[in-house]
Amino acid sequence: MADTSKLTDCKTKSTMVSVDEALQIALSVAQRLPPVTVPLLDSLGKVLAEDIRAPDPLPPYPASVKDGYAVIAADGPGEYSVIAEARAGNDGVGVIVTPGTVAYVTTGGPIPDGADAVVQVEDTEQIENGSVESKRVKILVQTSKGVDIRPVGCDIEQDALVLKSGERVGASEIGLLATMGVMMVKVYPTPTIGVLSTGDELVEPTTKFLSRGKIRDSNRAMILAAAVQQQCKVLDLGIARDDEEELERILDSALSAGIDILLTSGGVSMGDKDFVKPLLAKRGTVYFSKVFMKPGKPLTFAEINLEPAESIMRKKILAFGLPGNPVSCQVCFDLFVVPTIRHLAGWGKTHLFRVHAHLQQPIKTNSDRPEFHRAIIRWEVNNGSGNPGFVAESTGHQRSSRLLSMKAANALLELPVTGSIISAGTAVSAIIVSELSSTAICSSSLLSDSTSAFKGSSSQEIIADESQNVEVRVAVLTVSDTVASGAGPDRSVVILLAVLSVGTSNMGTLEESWGWGCERKGGQKEPELMVQSQPHMGVNGSLTLNMEKTKFGHIQVAGSPSNTGPSESLQPSPLESQPPGKLLGVI
Amino acid sequence: MADTSKLTDCKTKSTMVSVDEALQIALSVAQRLPPVTVPLLDSLGKVLAEDIRAPDPLPPYPASVKDGYAVIAADGPGEYSVIAEARAGNDGVGVIVTPGTVAYVTTGGPIPDGADAVVQVEDTEQIENGSVESKRVKILVQTSKGVDIRPVGCDIEQDALVLKSGERVGASEIGLLATMGVMMVKVYPTPTIGVLSTGDELVEPTTKFLSRGKIRDSNRAMILAAAVQQQCKVLDLGIARDDEEELERILDSALSAGIDILLTSGGVSMGDKDFVKPLLAKRGTVYFSKVFMKPGKPLTFAEINLEPAESIMRKKILAFGLPGNPVSCQVCFDLFVVPTIRHLAGWGKTHLFRVHAHLQQPIKTNSDRPEFHRAIIRWEVNNGSGNPGFVAESTGHQRSSRLLSMKAANALLELPVTGSIISAGTAVSAIIVSELSSTAICSSSLLSDSTSAFKGSSSQEIIADESQNVEVRVAVLTVSDTVASGAGPDRSVVILLAVLSVGTSNMGTLEESWGWGCERKGGQKEPELMVQSQPHMGVNGSLTLNMEKTKFGHIQVAGSPSNTGPSESLQPSPLESQPPGKLLGVI
């Protein structure tokens, strides 16, 4: 009946905001939560809401840097009588080092009065025949005044501003707070987030057998986990049917539970039973309900006004109506909800971390909306341009229902609306959405993972560029003392193997091999490439691949930066003849 | 008496192992913990100990991609009778679309039998005069078979291997598990870690007034926090006096509490009351007790054998005797304990994440041991070499008692043992020790923070290189649509100001300025530099600084990568004449 009559007012393109505008709106509406005072360890990861000054200097007394002997520097080397011990933990009061005497000190212990330097125990010699009463030691070196003594306040001056309001508390900051005796810390709390899924098609993930037309709800668990990763307290609001009254009832109970942010998923598309947006409009202000992006277009953002009875502290609650497609849902969380959480939690800068990454494969961009293309980025000694840098590998088909495209993804590539092909090797902006330090650890492992997990999935949107039908040489240069000395295996081989097996179902034949042992084995479908390196530093070889059928016009050869010290210069090895294709990289 | 007699056997250099050896030893001794089965959300961040296959295809039925009408594509545009609705959540059973009819469908809803395409609602027109019984719609476009329909299994095929044993569970993986109905997940648990501080000089951080010779214990809180950051369960073992029996009593109670890793700090140096190492040797095997590194030399690693009565499950417990100096303690945790935790927690690759970063200042390396220099790295559009990349800023004086050198640090620079100066702009290996995505957000804020917090602290070890007494030009190129359009301020100015005020107490006079408005103000001690940019894209100017007295031969001008889209090419602007010094960077 009145079924589709509401749809028309959503059609106007004018309601669509850009990603930047959407984020700006959300951040301007969002308000920092009032500070709370928490026990020291609970402040971890939170933003300070107070300046912290040092109540006393560190060290609070002149302290020894070494285990050894407190001496008068001018005394010089020679045999001395050990008058006392000034250990860490002793007060050292009353001990006075006079010319001709020394005192035993331990690391961190107080320097006795009179002494002006410390000689470490390694530079002394015990005199074994000394009696208990008259212990003696031989000082072997000449020292000078102040050596191996930390003066009062040299690490932290008394009253120094050590931590500032607005700084984020990590493990080291916890250490600094403990040093200063701060056991209760004033910080901005992280928000409490309620997560609700909507849709008649959804059943609980516990459902064993799906009846026709039903799917298990994945968004709720995913977004609850994502909010936990952002250190938020979470409230699972369950699944709401596509029913106006049920939705409103759940909303009311969520609001009275004291949430700061409401996240719904589904129900914000163009269907006639999408009740989320109308409900948000009824209970507050909808700021936008469409964003010019892919995925994530039907993102809705609103502020809900609370009745005075519902909450004494808060008057307003933020609500994101996330799209129902799981990928769109997660991408919108990363791009909009994360910065909003940070803003509420007192972060001065809520920006997501962006780097540049070189595309491993050509990617066709969308001609319709800017795309946030899911990718795995990793650090390479050669990003394809001859410099170290990030390389981005697409997670395959980017259909917004395909949650597999988010699997292991640690970055969203920001692709422009050109509808054209960005060729392999091009640098694009990449938003880091997962912790780099705990992902993307080893390029070879990631590559082989992705080869098997996403096999056959990269053929639809990721298409070859004009560098097809070109012969490409791969130069291999191993720089490793371990390999050179024969003490360890050359992992380059493993890595190269992993790289070359990406997309090899279409890789052409190996035309030629020379140098120090390149051999190719196996059938047409899953060719194996064997490369044997010589255990000698700086040795290099090359092999030529016919890239006729491969999807990769440009192969990034993975490197292992951990093998190379900063002093070792990594340069592509000179080839014996000019390569007809592109020089690909350096291991 | 027998006080210092034990010291001699620690003197032999032969017991010192390299960082790589030490890590290899720890990882070879460490054993993966036995898997446990946990509720879905508890698997977040953990490593899967089982393969997960899809029990059913996704979608389990042909599903609509849009809200709209399921049609027979061959029917073409025209007016049609709406026979039924196939909403998401309906089973759609019994609905058959025949030529001349269409059915209303919602996103994710099942496609009725007979239909072979979906026309989105935007491409249709309601026919308003249709009665309730005979609703009609006008299809405006020609579609083709399969359009806007997700066939069965197109996102996940039935029985596909979706997640593999060894993969780490993030929010998206939680979503995938929920989709597949996996509510109990077999994962490797993270270890339980006991943390103990040792030393007579230590008092609880709660201590308000320090008596002479005492300092507050900072290591325990810091390491507890660091272990929590690694998702470990922690056990606070308090402070042990420098007393053999007390230490052993605490060890016993810790072991019976079921810890997997014991972390002590202090008591592993060369003092005669360093009882940790002897106790570990007595109760198990000490694998190494000195590592060739700075800081962190006195790191001890051991395996403790448990009596059968102490634990049924475990036979061995790992123990790290961390150095007492807070910086050494944290660095050893980052370099050795984190990979060990990962190994126990089932990670296939435990490596820390390494990148290359260009030094912002010259750094003098240690001539004695390889140094892990604490730094703040951030991403710049120009890392100084003309390419985007990481730039590393030292946190100042690297004394191992100075915990401030860890404050805000997100990387450890791996510096070789050369005793020489690595000049600014050189790329070094940087181990990322803190989450990049949540730190180092804005270069300008970090720079100004460090300027004020660490002022005057950078003069001792960070010294000038041979590029002193050289005139250096700073080229400023602003690439910003916002600035160009006049819509926003040019933050380049702020950033440049912040950069130039680092170490400016020794900065020489500004010799000349030209271009679009460079002005220097202020006294000798704290010179202010004012640079006004013109709000126009691509405009550039330069100014010359007499670097005679500055400690920085090479200034990295900070950039703001978030301002630049991937399509904008950032290159150093051509200078009007050849610079006599070095071209420094691009904002």
Image (cartoon, coloured by chain):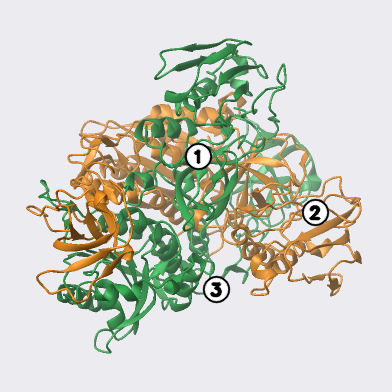
Chain colours: A green, B orange
Q: Position of residue B546 (x, y in %)?
A: 90, 59
Residue ID for mark 2 = B552
Q: What is the quadrant of residue A538 in the picture?
A: top right
B259 to the left or right of B567: left
Q: Position of residue A370 (x, y in %)?
A: 49, 57
A74 to the left or right of B402: right
Cα distance between the residues tagged 1 and 2? 30 Å
Q: Position of residue A219 (x, y in %)?
A: 27, 56
Q: Please report, as a chain letter, where disc 2 is located.
A: B
> Looking at the image, is B347 positioned above or below residue A264?
above
For residue A51, the mark is: 3
Q: Is there any visible trace of residue A555 in the rendered image?
A: yes
Cα distance between the residues tagged 2 and 3? 30 Å
Q: Position of residue B289 (x, y in %)?
A: 51, 32
What amino acid is found at the position of numbered circle 2 in the picture? Phe
**Do the CB atoms of the residues marked 2 and 3 lie less than 8 Å apart?**
no
Cα distance between the residues tagged 3 and 1? 33 Å
Which residue is drawn at the image coordinates 56% and 60% (left, top)? Answer: B441
Which residue is drawn at the image coordinates 61% and 16% (left, top)? Answer: A485
Residue ID for mark 1 = B352
What amino acid is found at the position of numbered circle 1 in the picture? Leu
Quarter occupied by the N terminus of chain B: top right
Quick one: SS at disc 1?
loop
Crowding around mark 3 (Cα neighbors within 10 Å: few <14, some 14 to 19, many 20+) is few
Q: Are marks 2 and 3 on the same chain?
A: no
Q: Please report, as a chain letter, where disc 1 is located.
A: B
Q: Are marks 1 and 2 on the same chain?
A: yes
Quick one: SS at disc 2?
loop
**Do the CB atoms of the residues marked 3 and 1 lie less than 8 Å apart?**
no
What amino acid is found at the position of numbered circle 3 in the picture? Asp
